[in-house]
Structure formats: C-alpha cells, structure tokens
Image (spheres, rainbow, N blue to C red):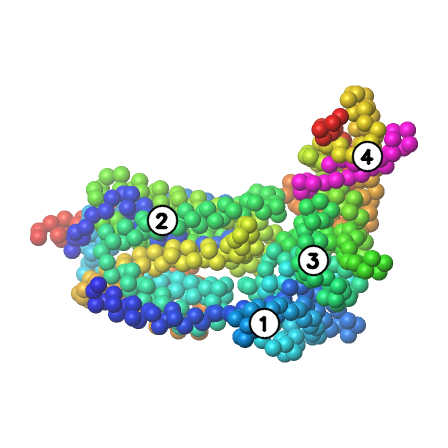
Amino acid sequence: MRVKSRISSVNLFFLLVQTMIGVGLLSLPHQTHDAAGSDGWISILISGFFIQLIVLLIWLLCRNFPNLTLFDFSKVILGETSGTILNFLYIIYLLTVICYIFIIYVDTLKRWILPETPAWILFLIAFVLLIYGSICNIKNLVSLFSLLFIFILFLFFITFLVYGDPYIDVRYLFPIGSSGGWNILKSTSDSMISFIGFETLLIYFAFIKQSKTISALKGVFLAVLFVTIFLTYIVILSTVMLSPEEIKTTSEPVLYILSAMEIRILSRLDLIFLSFWGLIVFTTIISYTFSASMGISKLIHIKHKFAVILSGTFVLIVSIIFYYMDITLLEKWLKHLCLIFGIIIPILLLLITIIFKREAASTYGKN
Amino acid sequence: MGKTELFLILFILPLLAGCWDERLLKNSRTVYVSGFDLNENGDYQTTSIIRDLNISESSRGEISISNELVTGKGGSIKEASMTIDQSVPGNYDPAKGRTLILGIDVAKGDIYNVMDPLYRDPRVDLNAKIAVTDNSANEIITHLSENEVEKGEYLYELIHSSEIHSEIQDITLRSIRTYLFDEGKDFMLPYLSKDEEDNEIKINGAALFHDHSFTGQFLSPAESTLLLLFMETQSKKALLTEQLDKKAGGSVSYNVKSVSRKLRLEKEEKVHADIMLQLDVEIVDYPPDHLDKQEMINFLENRLSKILTEKADALFKKLAVNQSDVLGLGRELIAFHPSIWKEIKGENYYEHILVNPKVKVNVRSSGIIL
C-alpha cells in the first residue's frame, strides 16, 4: 500500500534528529570512556561517519520502492511469507527499543529527581503520553518534532554555561589517540548504539517527495551530521570537566556536571536539563511507536489508533517486567539487535534487490 | 474536545495530583554545616548544626528560627547520620550543608571515605566548600554554634573571601572529586584553626594533600598565593607584600594583574620542569614613591623578580618534601610527554620531578599616582 502524505527534506531532518537524540545522551560519555578512554570523541566521530554510509545504503534501498515503507517492500523483496516474518521481527525490534528507552527514562528520573515516586506511576505517565503522542499522522508528527527542536537547542545552551567553570582542564583530552587505533575502532561498535534511530528511515523514506533525487538525502545527511556534532560535543565536554577515573564511576556525567553549576539565582541546572531532556526522549518514543504501529496495522490489518494502543500496552507490560527483573539485560541485547536490524538486514535487502532486480513495479504496477 | 482527550486527561490527573516527592521545609531539619571526625576506635563522628524552622500557629504563622547542635557516631558516615536522624524529630537532611569540615584524623586518612555517601545522593549541594582543621571538627562547630550568629554562613563567607583574595585554591565538593580521582594532580584545602586569644576561627593557610590524604604540612597564605599564580588560577585579586632592604624603602605591596607561564619539561637524570612566570603587577602600596623614574621601576622589578624566584624555590622544595603535586605536573606529563610518564608513574612520581622556577615581574601600573 502506498502512503498518501508527503513530507519535505527539511521535515525529514527534524524527524531524524528527534529520533536519534534521545535516552543515550546522558550516559554516552561514560560508555565511550569505558570503551575508548579519553578518545571517546574520536570514536563518536568515526561512528557518525559510518552511519552516514549506512544511511546512504538505506536510501539506495528505499529509492527502488518509492512511497513504500519497509513493511511493504519487504514482501516484494523476500516474498509474502518471509516478508511477513521480517516485518514481525522489525516490529518486535522497534518495540524492544521503546521498552529500553522507557526503562532508562524511568530509572534516570527515579535516581535524579523523583526517588520517592513509585516506578509504575512513571511508567503509566509515559504510557499515556506515548499513546497521546502517537495517535496522529505523519504531518502532526513533523510539526510536533520541529517545534520541540527548540528544546535540543536549549540543551545546547544549558551546557554552554559550564564554560564559566574554572576546573576545565583541556589536558584530559591528551594525548590524542592514546588508547590505540584498534581500540578506538573497536569501541565504535559500542558507540553505534547511541545513534540508533536511523533505522526508522526505512519507514520515513516512503513519505518523502521525490525520493529518487539526491535532494531527499540532504536532510538525512544534515541530521546525522547534526547528531554527530552534538554527541561529540557532549563527550568532549564531559571529558574536559571530569578526570578519567572519575568518569568511570559517574554514570551520567552531563547531569553530574550540571548539578554543580550555579549561575546567580539558579542552581541545580541538571533539573532543568532533565526536564528538557524528557521532552526529547518522548519524541524518540513517539517516533518509534509511530513506526511500530504502522507495521502492526499492516500486519494484522487494524486501524493505526488501535495499533498504537496495542504497542503501548505491550511496551508498558514488558518494560515493567524488565525494570523489576534486570535493568541491564535489554541493553546487552540491544547492542547486538541494533547492529542486526539497523545495518546487516538493510544491507542484505539491498543486495537481494540488486541481484534479483526487484522493483516496486513488479507487484504494484499492475494495480 | 474529543472523548479520547477527555478520557486521557481524567486518566492522567490522579497521577499528577499525588506529588509523591514533596518534601516540606517544615518537616526537614536542614543542615548548615557538618564536620567529620575519626576517633581511636575507627568510628566516625558527625557533628552538624541544624536549622529548625518553627511556624507558630498562634501568631499568624510567624516564623522563628532556632539552631541545634547534634552529633552522631557510626562505623560509616551514613551510619553516623542515621544515629543523628534517630535523635532529632523530623528528617535529618544533610543536603543543604554549605560547608564541610574534616577533622585532622579524617584528613590524614583517605578523605574519600567521608565523601562517598555525599556523591551518591542527588540532593547534596555539590558547591559546598570543604576545609581541614588542625584539631577536631567537633571543636570548631561547637565554637561556631556558641559564638557566631551566622553559624554555617560565617564559615562559608570566610572561605569564600579567602578565595577571592587568591589565598586558597577554589575547591568545591564537585571539583575535589576530580582531583581525588586524578593520578597526576593534587590539591590544597583551607586550613582552619581556632585562635584561643581572639576566640575566633581563622584560616591559617592551605593544607597540602598528597593523593587522598593530608600531608600534615600547610602553606602560608602568601605561599599559597604564589603557588596559585604558578597554576594560573588566581582570582581577580592577588595581593602580595615583599620586604625590601632599608635603602629601597621598607616594603612594597602589589597586586598581580595577569600571569603568563611557560613550562618546559625535560627528562635527564630526573624530570626537570623549568617554569618561567611573567607577572604583570600593579603597585598598590609603596611610600617612597619615585615611580616616575624608569630606573626606579627597573630596580623594583629586578628586586621583586629576585625575591619571588627565591620564594618560589623554597615553595617548590616544600612541595617536593610533601610530594604534593598541586601544580599538576603529573597531568602535564601524561598529556604531553606520555613516554616520560611511563617511566616515572606510580604513587610517588613527584620524587622524580625537579622544579626550577623563575619569576619575572613587570610593573605595569601604580594606581592613579606615580
């Protein structure tokens, strides 16, 4: 089924930036530091470059099937049965990501600002917001996301205030490359998880006007570039502010730094940061739910509205189970899952498309 | 408004109205200053001044404030504060403490033992100041609670004003953790003592730390100012006074306007650190005048450069004895000379470093007269 609405390249930029910047932002410096030491920022830059290539491949794949989402063209490429299975797997994957975001979101809020509030309350609030935000069409999504883009700029602005701090020590970045080239390259696979969100392009490319021309790609490239720069900036900031051993025992370096900042009448900037960050995380959740629900509604032929409620309920139950069972389990899975679903499967699909010359026209042309 | 929205709003309202995390000011016992001591048995003793807020219901909600001195003992800092919590009505809430005092026994051990529970609590004010005393923290706080009206604020202002005059390093609860975890950097904390004659608490200088513990030695305010100049972290005011010989006219006071430092590290038998410090100063007190003559200025510059170089020499000898790398030379080596660092790294790396300071003073201004 061809999608009806169209969005522009600029809209795609906002969609993608909002989907990619999310829950990983806070703990990113800690994770990259574990993997690559003070060279974490290099590993982010390399990952960013790598993601640009992946995005290019996804575009090459999607341009063969204008106005078709992954859930439609998978059947064209793999045939009816295996296509449906792949769709199902993708839906499960997207829902897992939402569960992961839910858990990290609630956990962070509970540790930093709401220690007394029971976790299920926070899960319930997130659930309601998820459903409220995701019952909409792509146009609403775009207008919401472009409005909330201001808050990403706010996050930028808040972190600028840190430069008043006298303890900044640029020497923590040196010697550049001390962890060794191989270690840095290896760590890129870890930092890749902070870029997840690009795989939603498999769905969003269907909505774009003139997806065959290179201009469709412009917004996407700029989005990935923006995210790369933003994450690199956050990592460099934390590396400069905290000593190497200290980052290892600080799970949210950005919040930790901000909680010590004081500007005249304002202190505890981390609380302000967290409330803006909450909005940014919600755009990620909404974007993923929107994609997953599209898949569900196509898979079992129900309305988008009911698909959203279905996926929301699934996420609520699963995330609560995982939250009380083992918080870190999902993260471990996700590291591999995002490589498989974000990179390996799109590449395989692309190869099959090229070798067997699959085209949208072959099935839908007749209608 | 559609039915769905209405339903959602009704659904979400009871979730928000709960205010699960409210903490009323009237219920919590806010701490203004805390001190930590270690007794012979290895137990920690926490002493705090708590500010009580009493809202009387009879006289139109008038607020009266009273202070209370509380102590608690325990095997860890957390246990000690639990003991306090049991002895006060309401919640003992250490979050707002603006100043922390470390007793000498705590400071000589691993001070991170005391800090650890503070970093785990998201509500602790990470901008709190930390100080070391020459005796027990209990004594200082007892004195404060008996003699000072402002209690905790008094100590905070005392430390803060010393920081503004570049007499001690600007260290907060947050920045001290960076130093503690950094293998190539040490730090100094304000060194408090109770002056028996004046019955006052004073800052005697800056206590030198090596790794996680107090070395037992401290720098005088003038020495510490000089060291801060070498670190290029002085604040706006950095006033120094030097005694000149009779002929040159007694003494001269000057304020350092700006600093530029050149650091060269070389590995010979030991690691030689040649530091060249250029100070642009403003003369603020020099009764003999005659600063209109160029030779007078030159003379003053030469004299001051010589005196300061000698003082710096003595200062770095003192640091070397205590192995206190406040200057952060270790970090400099890690960052820019990793090969040298590899040879000398270890807990006592400062033994291998020989500092050779040189100071050059330039008189740039002399106030509104010459």
Return the residue at label 2. Answer: A149
Observer able to see residue A355: no
Same subunit, tags 2 and 4: no
Label 2 crowd (10 A; few <14 / some 14-19 / many >=20): some
User: Decide: marks 2, 4 in contact (CB < 8 A)?
Assistant: no
- Looking at the image, which is closer to me, B323 or B58? B58
Q: CA distance from mark 3 to mark 1?
A: 22 Å
Element assignment for label 4: strand
Q: Quadrant of the N terminus of chain A?
A: bottom left
Observer able to see residue B217: yes
Amino acid marked by disc 4: Val
Amino acid marked by disc 1: Asn
Same subunit, tags 2 and 1: no
**Left-right relation of B264 to B295:** left
Residue A296: x and y in percent read: 24, 64
**Left-right relation of A258 to B341:** left
Amino acid marked by disc 3: Tyr
Q: CA distance from mark 1 to mark 4?
A: 53 Å
**Left-right relation of B291 to B164:** right
| Chain on which label 3 sits | B
